[in-house]
């Protein structure tokens, strides 16, 4: 059973950014290799087939142009073609790892390798489309893969907006998302704040939504109805400790949203943490996926995203 409860706080709006070492795993056309701290960039200098050994750094975004070599090789195992197999499945589907940077079925994918607003993304601020660079920037100093990532500007930069969420198209009321997330504040240690959500439109105040949020613990939240990972919950009398994600580390987040069958699934670093059935209370007509930072209860932080992909089936971590 998934832990559940009622969250405190209201659904209003807010932001974030981080720095530090990043790591990487699988590539698009070869295996990604890192030695200790650091990030990968460049197109693959070699490819892997099946269980072959990869000796180059794999690209995780089709827009990457530079090349690099590795100082430490890794073995790629498992079946599949070049770069490993793509995992598939519906809500709660099987598979994990060896994913693609940008699957052919994706309705949105970006490694944020160019300075412009990613194709297909919309930014609404204070109820109307706005210049996205007020609240976001492409950051070449902190990244999971490729040359850059997307930084959500922190509230300490006085951007004047609590709601900072890019909206991109979803393939339907049921879909999967994969992204890498990093924060300089432990994720899940604060009150109700939002990192991503499935919604019924691109506006700032969705009526149908399920959030991937923190609510004194990593959780799903819909109209203040909450599902936490099994065995975790809010820190209060008779309850268990909240589930948190370490600061200054990249985390592979996989979300399965199903608004019609009312099943929402969370995987972190290839481990299923939440499988919330009959949640939320009513069916939802999702059309949009949003990501960024919405500080409903404050929580100033720096936040980065990399390798964001939205598709009908499970995409897998890289």
Image (spheres, rainbow, N blue to C red):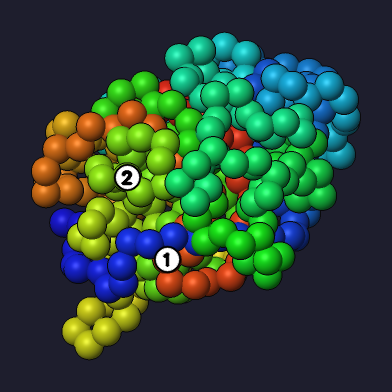
Q: Quadrant of residue 249?
A: bottom right
Q: Residue at x 22, y 88 (%)?
A: 237
Q: Position of residue 99 (x, y in %)?
A: 52, 27
Disc 2 versus disc 1: distance between alpha carbons? Answer: 14 Å
Q: Is residue 84 left or right of residue 136?
A: left
Quarter of the rendering occupied by the C terminus? top right
Q: Which residue is mark 1?
A: 296
Whether label 2 touches label 1, CB < 8 Å: no
Quarter of the rendering occupied by the N terminus? bottom left
Is residue 99 visible from the viewing direction of this image? no
Q: Which mark is residue 206?
A: 2
Is residue 46 visible from the viewing direction of this image? yes
Q: Is residue 226 above or below residue 22?
A: below
Q: Position of residue 50 (x, y in %)?
A: 58, 17
Q: Is residue 167 left or right of residue 90?
A: right
How many marks are shown on the rendered structure?
2
């Amino acid at each position: 059973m998934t832990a559940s409860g009622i969250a405190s706080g209201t659904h209003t709006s807010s932001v974030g950014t981080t720095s530090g070492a990043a790591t990487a795993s699988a590539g698009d056309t070869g295996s990604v290799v890192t030695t200790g701290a650091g990030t990968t960039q460049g197109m693959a200098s070699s490819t892997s087939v099946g269980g072959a050994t990869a000796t180059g750094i794999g690209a995780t975004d089709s827009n990457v142009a530079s090349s690099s070599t590795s100082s430490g090789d890794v073995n790629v195992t498992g079946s599949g073609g070049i770069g490993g197999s793509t995992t598939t499945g519906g809500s709660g589907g099987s598979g994990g790892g060896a994913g693609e940077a940008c699957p052919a079925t994706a309705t949105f994918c970006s490694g944020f390798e160019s300075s412009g607003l990613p194709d297909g993304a919309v930014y609404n601020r204070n109820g109307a489309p706005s210049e996205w660079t007020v609240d976001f920037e492409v950051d070449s100093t902190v990244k999971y893969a490729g040359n850059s990532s997307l930084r959500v500007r922190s509230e300490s930069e006085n951007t004047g907006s609590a709601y900072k969420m890019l909206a991109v198209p979803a393939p339907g009321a049921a879909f999967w998302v994969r992204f890498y997330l990093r924060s300089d504040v432990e994720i899940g240690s604060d009150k109700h704040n939002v990192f991503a959500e499935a919604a019924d439109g691109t506006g700032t105040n969705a009526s149908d939504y399920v959030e991937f949020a923190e609510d004194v613990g990593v959780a799903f939240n819909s109209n203040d109805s909450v599902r936490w990972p099994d065995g975790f919950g809010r820190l209060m009398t008779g309850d268990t400790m909240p589930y948190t994600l370490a600061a200054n580390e990249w985390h592979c987040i996989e979300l399965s949203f199903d608004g019609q069958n009312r099943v929402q699934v969370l995987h972190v670093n290839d481990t299923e943490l939440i499988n919330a059935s009959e949640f939320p209370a009513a069916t939802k007509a999702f059309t949009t996926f949003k990501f960024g930072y919405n500080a409903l209860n404050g929580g100033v932080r720096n936040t980065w995203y990399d390798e964001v992909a939205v598709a009908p089936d499970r995409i897998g971590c890289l």
